[in-house]
Amino acid sequence: MTTRTLELLHWNDVHGRFEGLARLSARARQIRAEADHPMLVLDGGDVEESSVRLSALTKGVAGWRLLGAAGVDAAVVGNGGLFRYGPGQLPHYAEALGSAPLVCDLTDAAGETPAGAAPYRLLKTGDLRVGVIGITDYYSAYDDFGLAERGRLTACTRAARTLRADGADVVVMLSHAGLEHDRGVSWHLRGLVDVIVGGHTHHLLDGGAPESGIPIVQAGCYAEHLGRVRLEIDADGVRVVDMRVEPVGEDVSPDPVVLDELAACERDLDAWLAEPVGVLDQAAPWAEPGEDSPVARLLAQALLSTYPAELGLVVGLHCTAGLAAGTLTRGDVWAATSSPGNAATCTLTGAQLRRMVRIGSSREYAARSRRAARGRFGRLHVVGDGVTQSDGQLMVGGKPPDDERRYRVTGSDFELGQYGELLDSPPEDLVVHTPEILPELLEAHLTRASAGTPPDARPAGSPSRR
């Protein structure tokens, strides 16, 4: 059997660095044009980034459109879009990419691979058939979207055997589970998988990862490096003969195909944002994180009108701009909040409420931040009929909350979940209402209020317990 060569070009964790992606694409096209052997381009997940306007306002779809423009042959589902927007975005990502995102270790409520995704693909390049399997890290928040973990090692083993039976000459595991995980499973996948192309943990592995059962590669993050893996296939099997990363900096001219698609994404977004959605009688200004924010109070009222309760809770973190009086466009709403948070409801005792307000009204709390939050927490705002909040004290109906009484509360999964750091643990009856996110709920509230119609009982969604 003649020795054949396959080269894999890969990147991971672009996180909204779309001009960098255009440079990666240009370099990949150059390598492909000069090569005399089959090649594939693979994406290791997390092209999305909630702090990047174009990505956030398209719920990650723009990034997948750009992957398609870059000629990516296969991409794995990362946590960037799934964690924030849920599996309902996967069909949109598939349409944007031109093929289904890969993930074999997630299931929907029926125990099937989520709609829009595929567990693996068998690709043909030159005279080679290459099987690519996708895996991703699992977060407890996925439970809220009706997802569950599938036994990863069992799923990968089954997928690899299926691909081999279907004639795959090479099997690649495209992983967004992180380096340490990949090292662990690599020992169990010898003889089934030939190389693991990784992501998620932002490791820059020039020469691959040592001390692993099969070769593992990862190309850092933020579209700064292109990974290259060369394999040889002959009668003795498959060998990885070279693993490297090369920097792709601003000296590389960006791919005009990707830049054209980027401009098209911006035009489509601008048209969508320009649509009017409602009228606001009184302006709702934004305020610094430690101050009282009228726009945050308006957002709390929007949550309360959609999921009626005695109190509505929102921290300033969700809001980034104020709203002027008069006709509002969708762009105005999404400038005020593009938060990917979901509505959440539960019951809390008066003692829990008073503690939350005491903590959430402090300067120390307002200044807190964490990576998942993408900013300072800001002050906690509490609204409701007969509810007042002053100097860290809460009054309900003119008196402090009764410590023993239970109150019905609406907020987001941030305030009422683990990330908001306002409760010792999430309430037992906490329900997170997916898949709508806060700007969609605020938009719907403004539209209803402008039309003078009563709020719907609930928007269409998939409530689930966290």
Image (cartoon, rainbow, N blue to C red):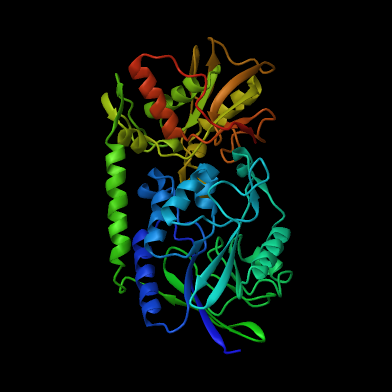
Q: Residue furthest top?
A: 398
| Residue that appears at 27% across and 54% down | 263
Residue 454 in which image quadrant: top left
**Which sits in the foreground, 401 or 393?**
401
**Which sits in the foreground, 87 or 339?**
87
**Which sits in the foreground, 302 or 12?**
12
x and y percent of residue 109 in the render? 66, 40
| Residue that appears at 31% across and 57% down | 261
Using residue 129 as the reference point, say whether residue 253 is left or right of it: left
Residue 231 in which image quadrant: bottom right
Rendered view: 78 above or below 88: below
Q: Quadrant of the C terminus?
A: top right
x and y percent of residue 1 in the render? 61, 89
Asked whether residue 296 appears in the rendered view, the answer is no
x and y percent of residue 112 in the render? 65, 47
Asked whether residue 385 appears in the rendered view, the answer is yes
